[in-house]
Image: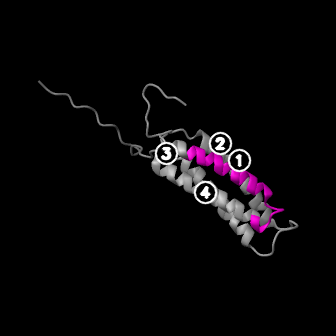
Amino acid sequence: MACQGNHNPSVSTMNKAVGVQMIVYSLLLAGLSYFINHLAPSLARSILIVGLAGAVVFLIASIRTLAGNRSKVLPLLTLIPVNLMLLANTVSMWEGGSPGMPEGRTLPMIVSLLFVLSFAMLVRIAYAGVVFQAPPTGSTPPSPTRARP
């Protein structure tokens, strides 16, 4: 989105720190997706596919962010389906009853951790650069003083 005119650049910016966090997240997403698939190959195939595809697209978006691109569209459009798929898998794994799921709580806990990390990154990018400085309630803006002759 190209903005023209009176544009407040602090509202939609993503800086280099967010770009580095995005790179770390994309590596975590790929690594944890592969690890989850290693624990339960038949059950977690969708996590592997969406996790690796999301990590590649997210890595491209993070490199663009480090290069100076301020757009949030690509990272947000990548994180939304990843979060929805992880939420569905988290709920189904905690419910149990899936054949082929290993005993114990390790797999549901790792999928839950990956979902929480993905949701936190979604919120982090959505609010990147937003300034929450509003004037106090009930106060009036200062009026300019006139010089008296």
Q: Which residues are magenta?
A: 38-62
Task: Report the residue at 76% width, 62% height from top.
Answer: 37
Pointer 1 or 3: first along the chain = 3
Residue position for label 2: 77
Residue at (55%, 48%) from the top-left corner? 125
Q: CA distance from mark 1 to mark 3?
A: 23 Å
Sequence-first tag of 4 and 1: 4
x and y, in percent, of residue 148 in the image: 14, 26
The residue type indicated by label 2 comes to Leu
Mark 2, other Cα within 10 Å: few <14 / some 14–19 / many ≥20: some
- Type of amino acid under label 4: Leu
Label 3, on which residue?
A: 66
Checking the image for residue 81, the label placed there is 1
Secondary structure at numbered mark 4: helix
**Horizontal side, residue 99 vs residue 84: left or right:** right
Are the residues tagged 2 and 1 within 8 Å (C-beta)? Answer: yes
